[in-house]
Amino acid sequence: MTEPDDKLHWLVRPETIKKLWWGGCLLLALTVLAQFVFGFEGYFGIDGWFGFGAVFGFLSCLAMVLFTKGLGYLLKRPENYYDPVDHDD
């Protein structure tokens, strides 16, 4: 049974989530486009490229997610790992 949209908390309403996604995308686009207004000369060759910060941030986040997924598979325990053990001594 689901609640009507007007009874939900404002942060979990579908229209609010859509507005937050659009607002976040707009904010990200504006920060990348701000590089046209505020020129930036990088310390290294590659960090002066247009949109480098956005691409670097995205790839860093992607690498962290992939690393933690692999770490999760490595550290995963069986479903019954914490079940009580019967000692028949």
Image (cartoon, rainbow, N blue to C red):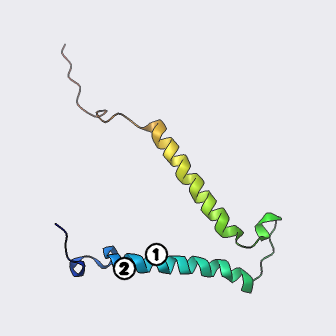
Kindly identify which numbered label has been placed on residue 82.
Answer: none
What is the three-letter code of the residue carrying label 2? Thr
Q: State the image quarter where residue 62 is shown.
A: bottom right
Kindly identify which numbered label has been placed on residue 16.
Answer: 2
- Secondary structure, mark 1, is helix
Q: How would you rate the neighbour count of disc 1 (Cα within 10 Å): few for under 14, some for 14-19, many for 20 or more?
A: few
Residue visible at 64% across and 69% down in the picture: 54
- Secondary structure, mark 2, is helix
Residue visible at 63% across and 59% down in the picture: 59
CA separation, marks 1 and 2?
Answer: 9 Å
What is the three-letter code of the residue carrying label 1? Trp
Kindly identify which numbered label has been placed on residue 21.
Answer: 1
Residue 5 % position (x, y): 24, 78
Residue 48 % position (x, y): 79, 70
Q: Is residue 48 above or below residue 7?
A: above
Cβ–Cβ below 8 Å for labels 1 and 2?
no
Say which of 69 and 22 sits in front.
22
